[in-house]
Amino acid sequence: MPPRRLDLSTRVSYLLERARRIDVGSVVERARETSQLHDKWMPAVVVDMLWQAGVRNVGFQDYVDYDFAILGRTERATYMTHPVSNQIAQKYAHPDDRHLFHDKIEFDRVFDRYLRREWMTVEPDNADGLRAFAERLGTIVTKVPVSQAGLGVHRYRAADIEDWTAFHRGLRERGELLVEEVIVQHADLAAVCPGTVNTTRVTAFFDGTETHVLAIAQKFGRGEVSDQMSFGGFYTMLDDRGHAVGPGYDSHGHVHEFHPDSGVRIADFQLPMIDEVLAFVDEVARVVPRVQYVGWDVVVSPDGPVLVEGNWAAGVYENKPSVTGIRTGHKARYRDAIGF
């Protein structure tokens, strides 16, 4: 199969947009953080960050997160970066199908059989239906249909709601129009953080015949409704058999050898039902075949994997050398699967 070249015009447009929106103060702040962490001369770090961004397609936060300041050129070249990931997403997600992933209500409709939980939408006249749904389940999760990074996600206990008409009206005013049953997670996940549903991010590429798993990351929460970093969450990379490769970390400089709340050692974590998870991702990847590159968020329940959402702009999860001791990333897997 001939290599699939990433469109040059897409790359140029992306770089021009990044140049237009560059926040010099943010770059300097990231460089200062890197300089202090790795004992590097800050002006040299700034120049290196700009060079990597403009020539090597490395995001400024990628540079920080993946410890580029301590890596050699060959090692850096093994890392997938957000700019490259974004270019892949643009090329391999048909514009007519992207809304099926962008809008959470549309996503639930299309992938309903894989959610394995109940859900409903908040309509102008269904306050009584909402009450019956919530009281039967006890606790519900509401979502703004179009959002990212866990924003617009809330959790409510039916027992705490006194005025259902006002509650229903408030959901509509705030745009929390999707209501879902709370996922029950596997005991091995609950042992790490029982208060948050801890999702597994499986980044995959469907080539029309085969589903290629590119990277697996396990996210852990801190008892909030979401395990995203904006809620205090962090992640660790998993190997092909679902075992953690090291401690957890985030994009804010926090490293967690142990979960801060449960005390569980992150490097000991083993994702249960890994074979079922991989088979599940292969199945869901075929539902919308024109969106080929997706970051699938899956939760392992006591009965098997369930689908949380799919991200057509998949994002990147990678090794952090200063934490894991691993000085190579996953880019070769992306190249092998996609051929760019």
Image (spheres, rainbow, N blue to C red):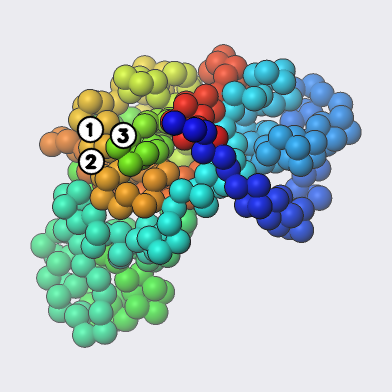
Say which of 205 and 181 sits in front.
Answer: 205
- For marks 3 and 2, give the one nearer the viewer: 3
Asked which secondary structure carries label 3, the reply is: loop
Q: Which residue is mark 1?
A: 279
**Callout 3 environment at 10 Å: few (<14), some (14 to 19), or many (20+)?**
few
Single out the residue that lies furthest toward the right: 43
For the N terminus, the quadrant is: top left
Asked which secondary structure carries label 2, the reply is: helix
Q: Which residue is mark 3?
A: 210
Single out the residue that lies furthest toward the bottom: 125
Q: Amino acid at mark 3?
A: Glu
Say which of 24 and 155 sits in front.
Answer: 24
Q: CA distance from mark 1 to mark 2?
A: 6 Å
Q: Which residue is mark 2?
A: 283
Name the residue located 57 percent from the left edge and 14 percent from the top edge. Answer: 325
Q: With 332 as the anchor, is 274 left or right in this view?
A: left
- For marks 1 and 3, give the one nearer the viewer: 3
Q: CA distance from mark 1 to mark 3?
A: 11 Å
Q: Earlier in the sequence, mark 3 or mark 2?
A: 3
Single out the residue that lies furthest toward the front: 2
Q: CA distance from mark 3 to mark 2?
A: 10 Å
**Marks 1 & 2, CB-CB < 8 Å contact:** yes
Name the residue located 25 percent from the left edge and 71 percent from the top edge. Answer: 121
Mark drawn on residue 244: none
Q: Position of residue 248 (x, y in %)?
A: 48, 27
Name the residue located 37 percent from the left edge and 31 percent from the top edge. Answer: 213
For the C terminus, the quadrant is: top right
Q: Amino acid at mark 1?
A: Ala
Q: Amino acid at mark 2?
A: Glu
